[in-house]
């Protein structure tokens, strides 16, 4: 993949929901949710489950050998939407719509990954923060991701062999 899956998810959600750059980010960027009337979306990488790995070999026209190793994995991300007003409550379903929309389908085709069918429920993580209520919801999303790397190998088309007869 040319682009990291989490960056693609950020782009998909930001584009579909028409959010600003400072409203959608990857987890662990030390950004605090401002006490404003806007929703904020945070995407976390949770886990990766290896599914398959394969190796193939090719020799090009210059007799140079190449090894391609591919791995396929199921990567799990959590997407959280939060706000101090009701916008996260009202707009949380837009995350599902973003992941199933035409722009998402195009990004999946462009970068060669697939979003698994979505889970059944949003988890309500709302809590009191000082005198305000932080409305916060989380949904886990799984992606099928394939990564490949190609390396040049030493390739020999003939081997010098010396036979030494046993006496």
Image (cartoon, rainbow, N blue to C red):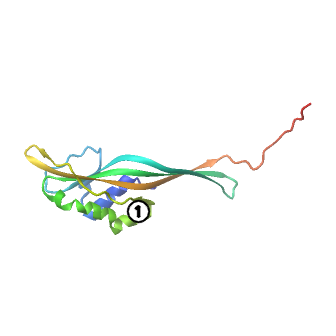
Q: Nearer the viewer, residue 161 or 51?
A: 51
Q: Which quadrant: the C terminus?
A: top right
Q: Residue furthest top?
A: 167
Establish if 108 lies above or below 49.
Answer: below
Q: Is residue 163 left or right of residue 71?
A: right
Q: Measured from the top left, where is residue 105 in percent x and y?
A: 38, 66
SS at mark 1? helix
Q: Residue at x 13, y 56 (%)?
A: 37
The residue that mark 1 highlights is: 108
Q: Residue at x 43, y 59 (%)?
A: 113
Q: Nearer the viewer, residue 22 or 135?
A: 135
Q: Measured from the top left, where is residue 138 in percent x and y?
A: 25, 52
Q: Residue furthest left?
A: 131
Which of the 4 image quarters holds residue 118? bottom left
Q: Residue furthest right?
A: 167
Q: Residue furthest bottom?
A: 102
Q: Is residue 135 left or right of residue 110?
A: left
Residue 18 visible? The answer is: no
Q: Is residue 145 left or right of residue 131?
A: right
Q: Nearer the viewer, residue 82 or 93?
A: 93
Q: How many marks?
A: 1
């Amino acid at each position: 993949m040319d682009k990291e899956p989490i960056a693609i998810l950020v782009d998909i959600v930001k584009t579909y929901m028409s959010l600003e750059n400072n409203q959608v980010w990857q987890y662990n960027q030390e950004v605090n949710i401002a006490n404003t009337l806007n929703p904020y979306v945070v995407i976390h990488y949770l886990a990766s489950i290896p599914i398959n790995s394969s190796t193939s070999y090719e020799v090009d026209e210059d007799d140079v050998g190449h090894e391609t190793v591919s791995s396929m994995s199921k990567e799990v991300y959590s997407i959280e939407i939060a706000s101090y007003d009701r916008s996260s409550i009202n707009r949380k379903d837009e995350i599902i719509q973003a992941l199933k929309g035409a722009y998402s389908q195009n990004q999946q085709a462009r970068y060669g990954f697939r979003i698994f069918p979505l889970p059944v429920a949003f988890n309500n993580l709302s809590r009191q923060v000082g005198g305000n209520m932080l409305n916060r919801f989380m949904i886990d999303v799984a992606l099928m991701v394939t990564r490949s790397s190609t390396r040049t190998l030493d390739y020999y088309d003939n081997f010098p062999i010396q036979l030494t007869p046993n006496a």
